[in-house]
Amino acid sequence: MRALYTALLAAALLAAAPAHAGGHLSAEAARYSGDTTVFGLDLDASGWLYGASGRLVHDGALFAAVEGHALAGAVDYDLEGDSSTDPTAVAEGRGLIGADLGGTTLYTGLGYRHLTAEPGGHDRTSANAYVPIGLTATDTTRGGWHMRTVLEYGYLFWGQESLQGEVLGVDVDETVSRSSGWQFRAALEFRKGIFEVAPYVRFYSLDQTDSTNVAGGSYYVEDVAETEYGLRAGIGF
C-alpha cells in the first residue's frame, strides 16, 4: 500500500510540474543514399529528396510527441553498371512518450517508415516498424539561439520488401519479410523566436529478408543500408 501511495504522489508531482505544448512545421532537403543486393546484383542509389515535416509536442516532466516527414525526388540508381534516374519517396511517422530526468529527456515510442522507388523501371516498396529509444539534451542559449541535441537508436522488429519487374529475364512480383534491423538518428535543433533550423542525419540498417522461391531459385533482399543527411527549416510554435 505504501508503494502505491508513493507512485500516486510521484505521478501527481509530475502532472503538476511546468509544461508547455508546441511543435514545428518545416521544409526539408536531404541527401539520400542507399545500398543493397537483389538476386546477387548490387543496387546503389544517391540523390536529393525534398519535402516537409511537422511535430506536435507536450514538453515538461512528462513528454509526448507526434511527428512525421515526407520527402520525394529523383534519385540516381546503378544496378551493376545499368544507370537510371527514377522517382523515390519516403514517408515516416512516429509517436513518442518519455520523461524529464533532470536536464535530459528519455523517450521511447513507435516508428513506421515507408519507401517507394522505381529503380530501373522496377517497383520497389520497403516498409519497416521500429521502437526508438532516445535522449534529448536540455536547451542551452548561445547568442539568443536556443539549442537542443537529439540522439536516438531504434530497434526494427518488423519489415517487408516488395519488388515488381523483370530481373535477369525473370518476372518478379514478390513480397518478403524481415524481422530485425536498427536505425540511428541525430540532430542539432536551433531556435530563435519562431524561426527553427536543424541539421540532421538518419541511418537505417535493415537485415536480410526471408527468402521465397522464384523460377526455381531463391529470392531475397540482402542487408540494406540507407542514409539521409538533411536540413530542415521552418517555424516553431
Image: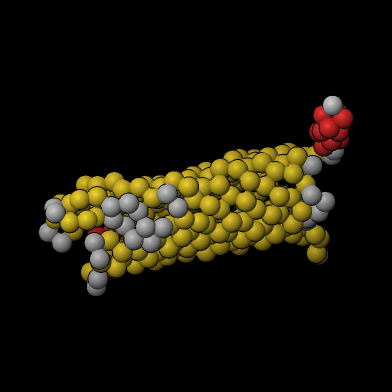
User: What residue lies at 74% left-to-right and 50% top-to-bottom?
Assistant: 105
Please determine whether, in this image, residue 188 is positioned above or below residue 52.
below
Q: Nearer the viewer, residue 82 or 6?
A: 6
Q: Quadrant of the N terminus?
A: top right
Percent across and percent down for residue 205 are 46, 60
User: What residue lies at 80% left-to-right and 64% top-to-bottom?
Assistant: 142
Q: Nearer the viewer, residue 20 or 6?
A: 6
User: What residue lies at 66% left-to-right and 41% top-to-bottom?
Assistant: 97
Please determine whether, in this image, residue 24 is positioned above or below residue 220.
above
Percent across and percent down for residue 88 are 36, 54
Q: Nearer the viewer, residue 117 or 54?
A: 117
Number of numbered discs visible in the structure rendering: 0
State which quadrant residue 34 falls in: bottom left
236 sits to left or right of 26: right
Most extreme residue toward the front is 1
Most extreme residue toward the bottom is 81
Q: What colour scheme governs how the chains and residues are painted in the rendered image of this protein? A: secondary structure
215 sits to left or right of 56: left
Instruction: Look at the image and tell me whether residue 22 can be seen.
Output: no
Q: Quadrant of the C terminus?
A: top right
Q: Nearer the viewer, residue 98 or 214?
A: 214
Instruction: Look at the image and tell me whether residue 179 can be seen.
Output: yes
96 sits to left or right of 139: left
User: What residue lies at 48% left-to-right and 47% top-to-bottom?
Assistant: 157
207 sits to left or right of 198: left
Percent across and percent down for residue 199 are 61, 62
Percent across and percent down for residue 198 are 63, 59
State which quadrant residue 170 falls in: bottom left
